[in-house]
Image (cartoon, rainbow, N blue to C red):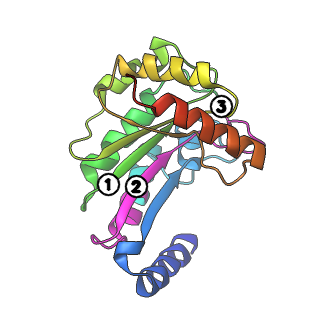
Amino acid sequence: MYEESLLAALGRIQDHIPAGDLAVQWDVAQELAYLEDVASRPAWFIPVKDGILQRVLRLAAAVDESVALGFHLCYGDLGQKHFVEPTDTAVLVDVGNASLKGATRPVDWIHLAVPKSRADAAYFAPLKQLELGTTEFYLGLLHPEDEEGTRERVKAASEFVGTFGLATECGLGRSSQAELDSILRVAKSVTAPRI
């Protein structure tokens, strides 16, 4: 019932917003809780990974090919806290690769969340296995008031993946004005050309 309502809403959106003005990003967070076996309720489908991929791919297929499509793979942000602290990017890479491989339409971008506390090689090492093809890749490693940490995360990630864009970990929707100002300052500084 939920998926049916979601797809109906997506259909109305696509009917009323020109494709060139629209981008759809599916948020894949609760699904990761099932994969990490930390969801508040167990998954009602087995095998879990296959069930998740079937659902994600149905949602992707519902987005018209003329509309930009992306995936945000995340460990949640309830109260600015993850539902589990990931040991590394392996689960994100696995879900990302399977989603890109199984999609029946192009996926324009994929975004992976990066915890503020992780700037170590072990966290980023699985990124070597990411199979992006022509899909743009973004790492959510920008955090407010943390320019030095952002630079460390960029450096660590760069050892395992060539080109990537910078983003916040989980969007800007819950950021205060002060946090937003800080994020913009950090982003400007970190992405400024070096002469």
Tell me which corner region of the image, top left, top right, bottom left or bottom right, holds residue 96: top left
Write down the residue under mark 2. 70
Write down the residue under mark 3. 84
Whether residue 96 can be seen here: yes
Write down the residue under mark 1. 108
Q: Which residues are magenta?
A: 56-83
In depth, the one of 184 and 98 nearer the eye is 184
At a point 55% along the width and 78% down the height, the residue shown is: 5
Q: Position of residue 68 (x, y in %)?
A: 35, 64
N-terminal of the pair, mark 1 or mark 3, is 3
**Disc 3: CA contacts within 10 A as few (<14), some (14-19) or many (>=20):** some
Marks 1 and 3, how far apart at CA: 27 Å
Amino acid type indicated by mark 3: Val
Amino acid type indicated by mark 1: Asp
Marks 1 and 2, how far apart at CA: 6 Å
Circle 1: element type:
loop
Amino acid type indicated by mark 2: Gly
